Image: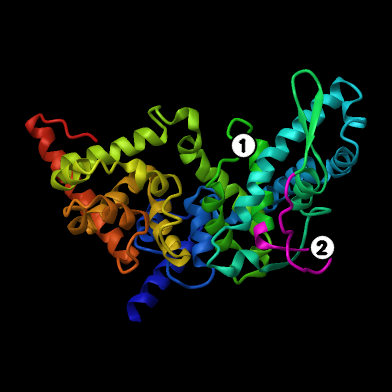
Amino acid sequence: MARVQKRLDDLNELLRDDVIDLAHLRDFCHHGVPEKPGCRSKCWKLLLDYLPAERATWPEFLAKSRKQYQDFLHDFIINTHDDSSTADTDPLGVLSANESGTRKWDDYFKENEFLEQINKDVRRLNPDFSFFQQPTGLQRPTPEPLSHRVQRAVSQSATVERTRQALSSLKSKATEDGPGELGQNEEQHWEVIERVLFVYAKLNPGVKYVQGMNEILGPIYYCFATDPDPNTSRHAEADAFFCFTNLMSEIRDVFIKSLDNSETGIGALMLSLERLLEQHKPELAKALADMSLKPQFYGFRWLTLLLSQEFRLPDVMRLWDTLFASRDRLTSMLYVCMAMLDLVSDVILERDFATSLKMLQSYPEEIEVTRILRNADQLQQQIAKTKLQARYSGEDLNP
């Protein structure tokens, strides 16, 4: 208990400085943020390069950023509300009356495609954890939920399929359940996640939305929305948007299919994991190779989703303390994945493909995240030492 209080006191002292020592904060958070409500929210905003180091600038910076997000909502949702309603009821009329209208309808139809996918994914976000299905307690900042647009465009009425020649065919699609019974202008947390992802997709047309992004945003939003300070939690949507955007700027390439085989894509990341194992855990690497159990079977999800689906949400948040504190998050992920494999090596070395695959796709709950992180630190230190020794001997041990 004394150690916990000491860490909390140390963090409070760090955050009281006029200029936050970010290097010191990273070192501190690497070992976990104290489980006191509100601590993690502030630390993550600093670690994800959202809040500036100068504490005196925070009020003005936050007000400006939150206003900017509100402007995004007006531009992409609120100001288009009337047009979208018209398009749903008369898709062949107003919006196809001229070239400008046709382009507008074309854009609207494309948006509906990724919005439909977002809607499906956010509804099933962390199903074993009821938070995302609960009411936010805040008024919805838009005239209606984005899910209503999906229901109109995809479910309640026919969907227009525009070919190169003309708007040609209509087809009906099944209706999904809407949100539960809520008060007027109330909404559930998953609806906020949906809105953030839609705004992100609109601002990043080269990426749009890719399945799995909801799993990255979810824990960040949860962290901010459960802050005990109402002046912080009521701005969770805007703050989560900017933190998510900053994180995606670093990891977005692993979501882009066309970059899978590039130096920054998921293929290169999984290859780096294989090489680390071959160089530093050769017996384990050989056992995996003998079974043809490649990272594509387990590492793709681990690396792309930052292990958000492998552990319970509280454990994911503890893991992300360390991950966000890293200066190179994807490299840190490689060592965490390597540690996870190392800690179940006794099973893998038996060379039973079915047993090993099942275990890696549903990682053993009895292996605690803190143990994995300690093992990852040890592996990273051992490898750094080995590389230093190899440098003097002229060997090449880069992954």
* Image location of residue 110, percent across then percent down: 71, 33
- Label located before the other in sequence (2 or 1): 2
Mark 1 belongs to which amino acid?
Answer: Lys
Question: Is 137 rendered above or below residue 265?
Answer: below
Image: magenta residue range: 173-190
Report the front residue among 328 and 361.
361
Tally of numbered tags? 2
Report the side of 7 relative to 256 (left or right). left
Report the front residue among 378 and 288.
288
Q: Residue furthest top?
A: 165
| Residue 183 within the magenta-colored segment of the rendering | yes
Q: Residue furthest left?
A: 393
| Main SS of residues in magenta | loop
Q: Quadrant of the N terminus?
A: bottom left
| Rendered residue at 39%/77% (across/down) | 5
Please give the residue where the numbered disc 1 appears in the rendered image.
208
Q: Is residue 340 visible?
A: no
Please give the residue where the numbered disc 2 appears in the rendered image.
185
| Rendered residue at 75%/34% (across/down) | 109
| Residue 139 within the magenta-colored segment of the rendering | no
Report the side of 250 relative to 156 (left or right). left
Q: Secondary structure at mark 2?
A: loop
Q: Secondary structure at mark 1?
A: loop
Question: Is 101 rendered above or below residue 183?
Answer: above
Mark 2 belongs to which amino acid?
Answer: Asn
